[in-house]
Image (cartoon, helix red, strand yellow):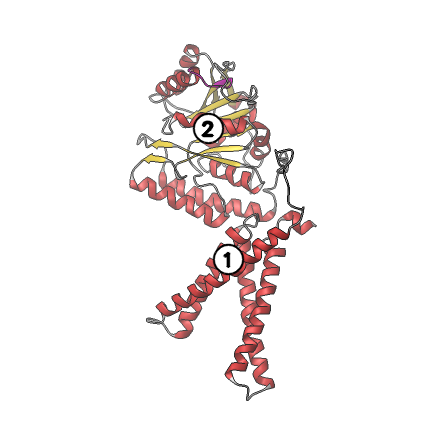
Amino acid sequence: MTPTPHLTASAVRTERPAEFQPAERSVLPHAGNATVDIVVPVYNEERALPGCLRTLHARLSAGFPFPWRITVADNASTDQTLATARRLADELPGVGVVHLDRKGRGLALRTVWGASDADIVAYMDVDLSTGLDGLLPLVAPLASGHSDIAIGSRLAPGARTVRGPRREFVSRCYNGIIRLTHGVRFTDAQCGFKAARTEVLRPLLKVTRDDAWFFDTELLLLAEHNGLRVHEVPVDWVEDVDTRVDVVSTATDDLRGLWRMARLKASGDARVEVPARPEPAAEHPDAVLAPATRRGALSWEVGCFVAIGIVSTIGQALLYWLLRGWWTPAMANLVSLFVLTVLNTEANRRLTFRHSTAPPARAHLGAGVLFVLGYLVTSGAVLWFKWLDPGASPAAETLVLATASVVVTGVRFAVLRLAVFASPRRRTR
């Protein structure tokens, strides 16, 4: 992996540093005076920039409850975008300009966010496709300390979008691939509407490498991998067809980025030192708390494991029955067993061991190895029994097979719990 070269001092120019504008009113108790720096990255946006800044500035001035400023991050525009940004900065108090000599949204955000002195940094696309009603819900959980990163989501329950079927399909497929390959819980990686607490963001920025559109996904994968709390805000989103995004090349770059992030996680280099969040504690002074034991967690894990096993067995039987109309018994059994093993593992990853940070690849690989070993052990037990007693009845063989299956299932649960899905803390203990 080749690190992205740092920009030289001459490559980044803070054209017009802006002062934070005071909050008009405080509607959030205990929010303090958290300062918010809202970055608008632009490349050749001389047409869209004036409407964006005037609309955003008017909304913030009308009653945003935190000290704020707007920073236009011009990344190597070749039209009059920079001149337009300077003129608007003179016109609108609280608007600053930063110019970069290289192109790339990820580069612009990493550079401006990394140098910001605000408590909270955010960004939004210049086309304002995301409704500004979501800005306060985006920032509030960060100001209160409840969350570390907040993202707008077009796919979360309650979100409303107006966009063409092609972009809808591509977006859902890409986010589905992220969840399948990395096991993440956020729903929308690339909505151009995000915010983060600067304190926890800076360590992540040192690891990010993408200069373009994959930067958003990269940042979120690192955040969740390091145990940060990601807050999702369902947003209203209206597509602006005047876009600079090349869908095909961006999709290709995103897939390469996902593979790079998988290798980064596997190597351990994705782990960074972030401020620790206090353990959950009861607010009520007279709360009656359960004993500090994992007995409740173990009961949940055993119960889920057994229930998923029962459902998987029924599902395999049904799939086998459906496939037998086209395939031989051996092929139908192989395919049904493979499909249900994958689904069983995914269900256990999401439910039984839902607090585990094990990546999906390790989970499915470990479960696959256990499946093969279990198959060999159960088959070997029956063959060994037949060798000892060639005249044994089918009922006796079935009993041996059932006994071996119970033993294998118990061992499989123990290995999954203690090794495959174990958190780093549990493995250390």
Question: Crowdedness of circle 1 by 10 Å Cα count: few (<14), some, many (20+)?
Answer: many
Front residue of 237/221: it is 237
Pinpoint residue 378: horizontal percent, then vertical percent: 56, 73
Pinpoint residue 381: horizontal percent, then vertical percent: 58, 77
Answer above or below: position of 316 versus 151: below
Residue 5 placement, left or right of 75: right
Residue at the far bottom in the pictured view = 391
Q: Amino acid at mark 2?
A: Pro
Question: Crowdedness of circle 2 by 10 Å Cα count: few (<14), some, many (20+)?
Answer: some
Q: Is residue 75 visible?
A: no
Count all numbered tags in the image, as a single digit: 2
- What residue does disc 2 label? 137
- What residue does disc 1 label? 345
Answer above or below: position of 100 versus 263: above
Q: Which residues are magenta?
A: 62-69
Q: Amino acid at mark 1?
A: Thr
Answer above or below: position of 138 versus 67: below
Q: Main secondary structure of the magenta part?
A: loop
Which secondary structure, mark 1?
helix
Q: Quadrant of residue 402?
A: bottom right
Q: Is residue 325 magenta?
A: no
Q: Is residue 149 visible?
A: yes
